Amino acid sequence: MYAHKKSKSDILFLSVVYSVLTVLSIGTLLPFFQILTLSMSPIDVVNSYGFHFIPTSFDFAGYRQVFHNQLIWISYGNTIMRTGLAILLTVTLTFLGAYPLSKKTLPHRTFWTGFIVLTMFFSGGLIPLYMLVKGLGLMNSMWSLILPGAVSTFLLLIVRNFVHEIPVALEESAKMDGANDIYILRKIILPLSMPVLATVALYTGVHHWNAWFDSMLYIQSEKKQVLQMILRKIVLDGDIAAAGTEMAQSAVNTQSMKLATLVVSIIPIICVYPFLQKYFVKGTLIGSIKG
């Protein structure tokens, strides 16, 4: 078969694109390698200036402090529970909200879509949201972190557009065979929507895994705090007591523990992302074809 020959302009364009992507990738990965290397290096390396992308010697004292710290593991569990519940709730509510909006037969469909889009540009603000959460009795509970953002307008519109692209002939054929709406939703629409739902799950998971501000607002009990909030206290505020370390430990050991905590908090997201990447790209692009 005749292979398409690239022109000089195509080669030049691709060279520029790959060069830019390479620079961006290096700029993204180098800070991570710096933290990873320092987290497993001895004290003198941690205190020295310069870049440390490849470990020359090893000292896992920081990781030992992290793994023996009960508060970090409790907050780790809280973060896992928050992320899991949020993904389950957000995916379910988003799909159930997007499916009716994708149907042309929905009464006043344009009005409801516009009403939902309006919430992307206007909101009540932080203080009304805080008063609402407090009024509902959600303070100091896991639900105060999950329910306020359970449905994202942006994700709802992506799922709506994706479901809208599914051929109507599939549903009509199923109805001719005697299937009802619930059966069609569960057996046809839901399996075909898996790419975009994986996208929603990834967006939601990353957001809740990294979130700390709402935990600072709504959670008073230290044992109910999420990992990122404990991590913030350790890294930014220098709150060593938050990490449960003994005051007798040196500042250098504390620095190693900060780096080790950063690595431990990042690893789960890095492990999950490669498995969802193909769904992430496909779901996002297909959902953006039509408005």
Image (spheres, rainbow, N blue to C red):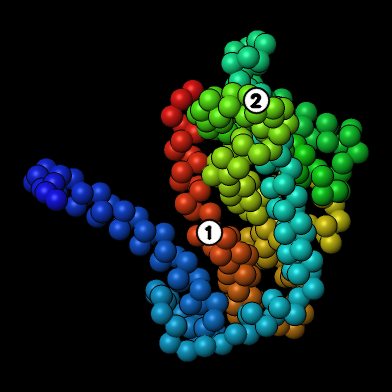
Residue at 35% x, 62% y is: 26
Q: Nearer the viewer, residue 102 or 177?
A: 177
Q: Is residue 56 above or below residue 117?
A: below
State which mark lies toward you, 1 or 2.
Answer: 2
Quadrant position of residue 111: top right
Amino acid type at mark 2 = Lys
Q: Residue furthest left?
A: 8
Q: Circle 1 sits in a helix, a strand or a loop, which is it? A: helix
Residue 8 as seen in the image, left or right of residue 111: left
Identify residue for label 1.
275
Of mark 1 and mark 2, the one earlier in the sequence is 2
How far across and how far down the image is residue 46, in percent? 51, 79
Residue at horizontal 54 percent and vertical 24 percent from the top: 168
Give the numbered dot on residue 224: none
- Across and down, in percent, residue 284 comes to 48, 39
Would you say 288 lies left or right of 259 here?
Answer: left
Alpha-carbon distance for marks 1 and 2? 35 Å
Return the x and y of residue 74 as percentages of the image width and height. Answer: 79, 66
The 10 Å Cα crowd at callout 2, few under 14, some 14 to 19, many 20 or more, is: some
Task: Measuring from the top left, give residue 3's x and y in whole percent.
Answer: 13, 50
Q: Is residue 207 visible?
A: no
Name the residue type under label 1: Phe
Q: Which mark is residue 175?
A: 2
Whether residue 85 sits left or right of residue 220 in the image: it is left
